[in-house]
Image (cartoon, rainbow, N blue to C red):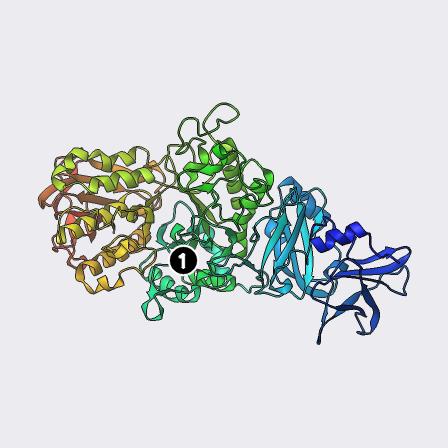
Amino acid sequence: MTLIDPEDARQIIAGTHADPFAVLGRHLWEGRQTVRVFAPDADQVEVLDIKTGIRIKALEPVEGAPGLFAGQATRRRNPFPYSLRLFKDHHVWTAEDPYRFGPVLGAMDEYLIGEGAHLNLWRVLGAHLITHEEIYGTHFAVWAPNASRVSVVGNFNGWDGRRHLMRRRGQTGVWEIFIPDIVAGEPYKFELLDGSGHLLPQKADPFGFGAEHPPRTASVVREIHGHDWSDDAWMETRAVRNRIDQPISIYEVHLGSWRRVAEEGNRPLSYHEHAHHLVGYARDMGFTHIELMPVSEFPFDGSWGYQPVGLYAPTIRHGTLEEFRAFVEACHEADMGLILDWVPGHFPEDAHGLGKFDGTPLYEHADRREGFHPDWNTLVYNYGRREVSNYLIANALYWLREHHVDGLRVDAVASMLYRDYSRKDGEWVPNKDGGRENLEAIAFLRRMNEIAYGEMPGIMTVAEESTAFPGVSRPTDAGGLGFGFKWNMGWMNDTLSYMSEDPVHRKYHHSKMTFGLHYAFSENFILPISHDEVVHGKGSLLDKMPGQGDEKFANLRAYLGFMWGHPGKKLLFMGCEFAQGTEWNHDGSLDWHLLEHGAHKGVQSLVRDLNRLYCETPALYQLDCRGEGFEWVEEGAADESIQAWLRHGSEGPPVLVVSNLTPVERSARRIGVPQPGRWAERLNTDATEYGGGGRGNLGAVESEPVAAAGRAHSLSLTLPPLSTLFFELQRD
């Protein structure tokens, strides 16, 4: 008796069958229970009673279909659970038949996936360790609507794409299969045939929670459920810590090069080691948050993580998913928030990645004028496709919810907002209204922020956005993009340009230090000195300072003081806090040995004290994002390269900040103050403990009824060369 249609048999052994669950496994055939198994690594196959292990039926090889076995049980209509016993030469083993199991995904999952509205998308797609129909194994699911066949491959099936063909689910384009006995740590990929039946490069799982060490590219099964979090106290209070009226000082870190172990092949630290060394250091330095350059899995070290392939996998370079969570907990135990750089703006064309995932431009645009970034040679997500938007928004929620991350800094927002970003005429496609704005990306960013803040109260989102696009950090119901904060790239560029000038010429560029105050309160700004300023031939932050020896350090100390006194939250890239001498190298460690030298140690001490002063002084942070928190005292002293301003909080006394950015000491310099009294010198960047000359005002200055800068009272100050000073009004 023929127990299988010959064409079905041909397609099964060829690995081209679009509906293998209709053929393999247990089916009624001419009124009797028939079992079909494709096992090309076996010579014989038996069907066993799953409870007793007793043989029910020995299957026969299907003629002309090597590896395919079929047989009819004595039982007629009643279905029965079973397992398999397989033979090859002298080897015997048992296995579960994946084709005897029913679907895992439910109708609601299918509906939400089709609508692009599944906010827990990572919990149904990807690889999940589950117990299904009383059997433990892994459920695999992937979106590939234009594929004619999808299968899971790995060591467990000899990377043979014919072995575990998946089940297509309705019209959603999702394929799934439950494979028993697959456990955590198992590498796997998806093998797909395109719509014409052509074999595609094997693909990593878009929802893979783990990955192999580069240069290997397979995904790895990881358990994401069941972690026993111990950071309840932090999670209950972080909403306050992330508010715009709180001190936020961010230490930006590249995990691969913060510190390396020279004695062990110059390897980078693990997540566990970072949990001890990095977290302890950042806490000691007074930072409130750590920001990590992208940790989503990426194939090329030189991209620093900004060309991710595995958006859902913490990079294995430093350890597993569980070890990453331990790092997050260490941050929270130290009362520090953790922000991740997040890259929804582009992705690389690596063959195992998202590009032409099912043989079509699934995640990217078909038109290269819309779907390709000339700056980075990467692909652009199709934000207007609901499934793609859902994939990215779910990824944001995944990091926030599953890993207790406190914020996301969205990379390259400007490149997302404009269709002509870095493109010449004729190389871009206008929007539906004929304009240059990317309306789909704008809608995506707004929805992402609405969902992130709505689903995970207390987090923050930050935009790296370098244009004058309005309302980046304004609520979406007011027409904004909905970010919590925006990097102030204009301030960074202007002030670094000014500081690079020889002090004798600075008076001609005075406006570069003052211009930022004209728009400082138009957004919720973070002042960034980021990794981008110390790479690609730009030199280190210290290198940007003019002069030689002590003068370079004095310039840097004065600039850091200016930055901490200026309205806006703070961000400093690793190494800048101790005046790293050379340009950042992602393949090496920071030059920690420089701390053996007094000048570098002094800058480190200054940054620690700036953070301490900032966090304990409400006037320096409470009204950071509101105009009433800032008041010019002297804006136009260009010939002296002096700026002086007052910072106000919603409570507490005001703080006077004065910067003298020439190498000339100003003695008895009158600076107007709004109130008479004793003004304590809270910090002076020329202090000897910072490597300066120790010139200053003996700890405090009493105001005098002498008019200056339009105020009835003033202070007679000693302003050391190349310095910034902070004074706080003392109240009884």
Is residue 697 in view? no
Figure check: 598 above or below 443? below
Left or right, 544 with respect to 10, comes to left
Mark 1 surroundings: few (<14), some (14-19) or many (≥20) residues within 10 A: many
430 or 680, which is in the foreground?
430
Of residues 645 and 291, the one nearer the viewer is: 291
Q: Residue at x 44, y 32 (%)?
A: 418
Quarter where residue 454 is shown:
top right
The residue carrying mark 1 is 336
Q: Position of residue 12 (x, y in %)?
A: 73, 54
| Amino acid identity at mark 1 | Met
x, y percent for residue 396: 52, 48
As drawn, the residue found furthest toward the bottom would be 90
Q: Is residue 684 left or right of residue 149?
A: left
* Image position of 510 with respect to 688: above or below: above
Q: At which x and y percent is residue 449? A: 50, 42
Q: Residue furthest top?
A: 434
- Is residue 561 visible to the viewer in this orientation of the structure? yes
Residue 4: name its quadrant: bottom right
Q: Which residue is outermost to the front?
A: 64
Residue 310 in picture, x, y percent from top left = 51, 52
Instruction: Depth check: give the residue in front, 107 or 640.
Output: 107
Give the SS element for disc 1.
loop
In the figure, is residue 490 to the left or right of 555?
right
Count of numbered circles in the view: 1
